[in-house]
Image: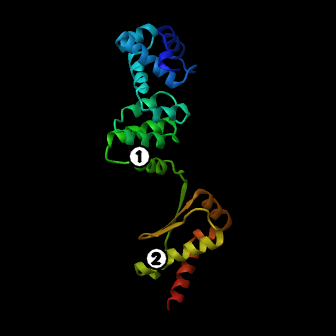
Amino acid sequence: MRSDELTEEKALAILIANLGRRTKRSGTLEIAQACRYLHDRYGSYEGVAKRVGAGDETIRQYAEIDGLPTEVKKLIQDGLLRGMEVPYQLSRIKDFQRMMKTAKAVGSMNSMDAREAIKYVLKHPQKSIEEFKQRIMESKRPVVDIDVIVIPLSDAVLQKLKDESQRKSLSKLLKRNIAKRLRPKGPVSCTIGDKVLTLSLEKGDYEKLKTEAPEIASERYLNALVSRQLAENT
């Protein structure tokens, strides 16, 4: 709707029909335009709020959206920026180029991430929106369940593992054997402490190990590996 088509009655009807309702009958820009029109007519946000039964802060924020550049309004009109909160937060960015770059970047985000992204841009004027998007991507990486097997090492095994290089060689050998036997889907970690060997695997690989190759997690198997390792190195 063009501003010259608005009347007081139409603007009031738009706000009464939309504000305070979960489902909006009008678009964000139409509501914003009505708020700005009535603010200019009544001279205050409080005056508009009393007429339509809404909070004056809500009226103010919608009115700020009406002041957004045409390019950002086009993104709202095309459905890339939805609701009131994200467009309003964008209106707080005063540099046009930065506002446009941020607006385009948050169009692919959900509302919560978009709001956090804009707050980040406002709080860190020297940092790019791409840095925030990278942080979002990293935080959404799937969480993987890891199971751990702790295998006590006998004095005989420890005696054979005299130095750090031998321990590292055993770790690599054990990981190769697991890879060959099980073809695990996830990474396998193997570390040797003072008296224990610790295997870390993804949950599915752990279950597969316990079912298909339980002997791998045994002192006897480790002793055989150490003997083999020493034989290959001599």
Check disc 2 and report the residue beneath it: 168
Secondary structure at badge 1 equals helix
Seen as rendered, the residue at the extreme right is 212
Q: Amino acid at mark 1?
A: Ile
Name the residue nearer the viewer: 90 or 58.
90
Within the image, what quadrant is residue 203 found in?
Answer: bottom right
Q: Is residue 44 visible?
A: yes
Name the residue nearer the viewer: 125 or 173.
125
Check disc 1 and report the residue beneath it: 129
Residue found at x 53% / y 42%:
108
Which scheme is used to colour this image of the protein?
Answer: rainbow
Q: Amino acid at mark 2?
A: Lys
Residue 93 % position (x, y): 36, 36
Residue 54 % position (x, y): 44, 13
Image: 6 above or below 194: above
Which circle's residue, 1 or 2, is located before the other in the chain?
A: 1
Image: 97 above or below 16: below
Residue found at x 46% / y 20%:
33
Q: In the image, which is nearer the foreground, mark 1 or mark 2?
A: 1
Residue 128 % position (x, y): 38, 48
Gap in angstroms between the C-alphas marked 1 and 2: 42 Å
Name the residue nearer the viewer: 189 or 111.
111
Q: Is residue 219 visible?
A: no
Mark 1 nearby-residue class (10 Å; few <14, some 14–19, many ≥20):
many
Residue 49 % position (x, y): 41, 12
